[in-house]
Image (cartoon, rainbow, N blue to C red):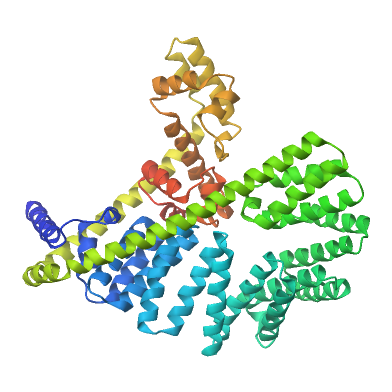
């Protein structure tokens, strides 16, 4: 019986392989049955339901599945399915902060929605595209798309979409120093929201508080300082009523900064310092950066330049600040101003050079982004033309294989049931093995002495001992951790460290680092329920990964599970 199913599976594989001359590399995370299901199932609802189930436990298969679904939709010239697949991919890559990739798929969804003449779909894709451009610092394109989305929303009288576009238009205009225009946009947003159930709707609350603080900033910049304080006090009153900490702090920081514009610098310092001391670790670093900058300006106004420079240096060490070009330049300008006041020519030249390097780097990245988007557009057009040219040939072959596939479908479904049942059992058993391993690891002492006793090289013994000490500091959680920094931390060189890892642990440094990180996150997730509530991206950053994809691959390689499955099992245990 087993041999029969094996032959059947091979037969289906050969048929499908013949049907599509080659399986795209994007599909390598899918089984052959899953590929066949996506390529042949007539119900798009069933395909979307299947792919939605993949999102929870296997994000790589989710991406591959939708790419395959999009390819099929283009081949069949099915605009609705093209929109469905492309919009899902665009939104997914947006959430992964891969905005260049998101732009590629969102352009496809936008093209399909316009061909369908579906205004809601056009608005949805336009807003996602605007967000992509904004995150890539392509301000003009972002503003253009948000304005288009707002215009269409007004046309069909959809206030929810209008409330998505309008405050973002205002935010961009603030970044462009167009405070009068931004003030009008924020005021319009607030007028719409005042007709909504703000107190009972979290999404409305977020837009309301964001727009209110934006209005306060505009009034402050326009010199209407008492009005700015009044707006912020209105926000404070509502935040207290709703018992919301973050907006409460935001409004108090805004009021404190108003005193800077009133030239009451010590009052501003006292208020800002009080807020800084009350902030906990959950407060966004982005806002802490602004708070530090406001403080630095006040200290500079009181000629306390040493304190101002210290705060600016703290800000430059936070990676989040690099995404805010305007703030970054303002911080550089303040450094240069302070150096001039101190008549420190060397420091002034250093700060100017750093600012110039930053501007050049941003310009280079900006051009690379434009080139990548342009290249993606060209490749997309070429790919569509190639697929359409093969349409007649593929359709002819599909007619020949349709009856055979229909006959084999029953057997394929039986085989799929057996396969999924076995797969779930294997995953569950693997989870139990990991938990048992973690328990055993906690009960077992450090084995560095055991490893050292097996070698005679004194230098290697010393390196292993120092590594063991270093591991206790959780050095591997740093994003900057690499072979060089680790060798430097234990007072050796990269050659000795690499050779010791290869000889004793039978690992490269990369393998050693991944093992430390994954072992740590397995234990941390098991012991800390709060940590399990983090997003996958936040977890990957917490243990030093710069890329979510790299973390997913390392976790899968170590455990044969996805992080989301592991977390779900822990929560249900």
The image quarter in which residue 499 lies: top left
Query: Could you say which is closer to the camera, residue 507 or residue 264?
Result: 264
Q: Is residue 331 above or below residue 183?
A: above
Q: Residue 277 vs residue 383: left or right?
A: right
Q: Position of residue 244 (x, y in %)?
A: 72, 68
Task: Tell me which residue sits at (56%, 30%) in the image.
Answer: 471
Numbered-mark total = 0
The image quarter in which residue 467 lies: top right
Task: Tell me which residue sits at (18%, 56%) in the image.
Answer: 22
Q: Position of residue 460 (x, y in %)?
A: 48, 15
Q: Position of residue 508 (x, y in %)?
A: 41, 28
Task: Tell me which residue sits at (54%, 24%) in the image.
Answer: 487
Q: Is residue 248 above or below residue 328?
A: below
Query: Could you say which is closer to the camera, residue 163 or residue 2?
Result: 163
Can residue 105 be seen?
A: yes
Task: Tell me which residue sits at (42%, 66%) in the image.
Answer: 90
The image quarter in which residue 101 lies: bottom left
Can residue 282 be seen?
A: no
Q: Position of residue 134 (x, y in %)?
A: 57, 64
Image quarter (top left, top right, bottom left or bottom right) of the N terminus: bottom left
Q: Residue 381 vs residue 396: left or right?
A: right
Q: Residue 144 vs residue 316: left or right?
A: left
């Amino acid at each position: 019986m087993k041999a029969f199913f094996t032959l059947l599976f091979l037969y289906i594989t050969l048929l499908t392989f013949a049907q599509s001359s080659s399986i795209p590399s994007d599909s390598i995370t899918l089984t052959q049955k899953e590929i066949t299901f996506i390529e042949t199932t007539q119900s798009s609802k069933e395909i979307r339901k299947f792919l939605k189930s993949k999102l929870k436990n296997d994000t790589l298969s989710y991406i591959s599945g939708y790419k395959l679904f999009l390819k099929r939709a283009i081949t069949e010239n099915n605009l609705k399915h093209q929109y469905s697949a492309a919009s899902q991919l665009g939104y997914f890559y947006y959430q992964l902060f891969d905005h260049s990739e998101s732009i590629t798929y969102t352009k496809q969804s936008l093209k399909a929605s316009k061909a369908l003449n579906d205004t809601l779909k056009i608005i949805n894709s336009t807003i996602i595209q605007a967000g992509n451009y904004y995150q890539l610092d392509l301000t003009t394109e972002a503003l253009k798309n948000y304005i288009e989305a707002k215009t269409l929303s007004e046309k069909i009288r959809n206030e929810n979409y209008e409330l998505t576009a309008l405050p973002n238009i205002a935010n961009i205009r603030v970044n462009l120093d167009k405070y009068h225009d931004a003030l009008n946009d924020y005021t319009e947003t607030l007028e719409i929201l005042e007709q909504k159930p703000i107190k009972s709707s979290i999404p409305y609350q977020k837009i309301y508080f964001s727009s209110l603080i934006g209005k306060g900033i505009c009034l402050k910049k326009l010199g209407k300082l008492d009005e700015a304080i009044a707006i912020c006090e209105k926000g404070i009153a509502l935040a207290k009523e709703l018992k919301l900490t973050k907006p409460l702090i935001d409004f108090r920081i805004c009021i404190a900064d108003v005193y800077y514009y009133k030239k009451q610098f010590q009052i501003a310092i006292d208020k800002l310092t009080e807020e800084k001391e009350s902030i906990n670790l959950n407060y966004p670093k982005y806002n802490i950066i602004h708070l530090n900058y406001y403080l630095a300006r006040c200290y500079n106004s009181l000629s306390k330049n040493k304190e101002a420079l210290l705060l600016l240096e703290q800000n430059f060490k936070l990676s989040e600040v690099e995404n805010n070009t305007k703030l970054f330049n303002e911080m550089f300008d303040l450094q240069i101003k302070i150096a001039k006041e101190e008549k420190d020519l060397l420091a002034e030249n250093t700060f100017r050079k750093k600012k110039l390097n930053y501007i050049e780097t941003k310009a280079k990245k900006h051009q690379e982004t434009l080139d990548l988007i342009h290249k993606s557009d060209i490749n997309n057009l070429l790919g569509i033309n190639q697929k359409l040219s093969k349409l007649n040939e593929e359709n002819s072959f599909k007619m020949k294989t349709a009856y055979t596939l229909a006959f084999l479908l029953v057997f394929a479904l039986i085989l799929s049931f057996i396969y999924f049942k076995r797969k779930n059992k294997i995953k569950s058993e693997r989870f139990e093995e990991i938990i048992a391993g973690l328990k055993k690891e906690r009960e077992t002492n450090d084995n560095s002495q055991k490893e050292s006793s097996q070698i005679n090289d004194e230098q290697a013994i010393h390196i292993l001992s120092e590594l063991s000490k270093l591991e206790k500091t959780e050095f591997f959680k740093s994003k900057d951790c690499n072979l060089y920094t680790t060798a430097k931390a234990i007072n050796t060189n990269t050659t000795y460290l690499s050779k010791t890892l290869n000889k004793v642990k039978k690992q490269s440094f990369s393998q050693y680092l991944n093992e430390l990180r994954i072992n740590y996150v397995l234990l941390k997730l098991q012991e800390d329920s709060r940590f399990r509530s983090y997003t996958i991206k936040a977890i990957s950053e917490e243990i030093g990964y710069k890329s979510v994809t790299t973390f997913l691959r390392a976790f899968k390689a170590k455990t044969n599970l996805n992080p989301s499955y592991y977390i779900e099992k822990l929560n249900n245990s």
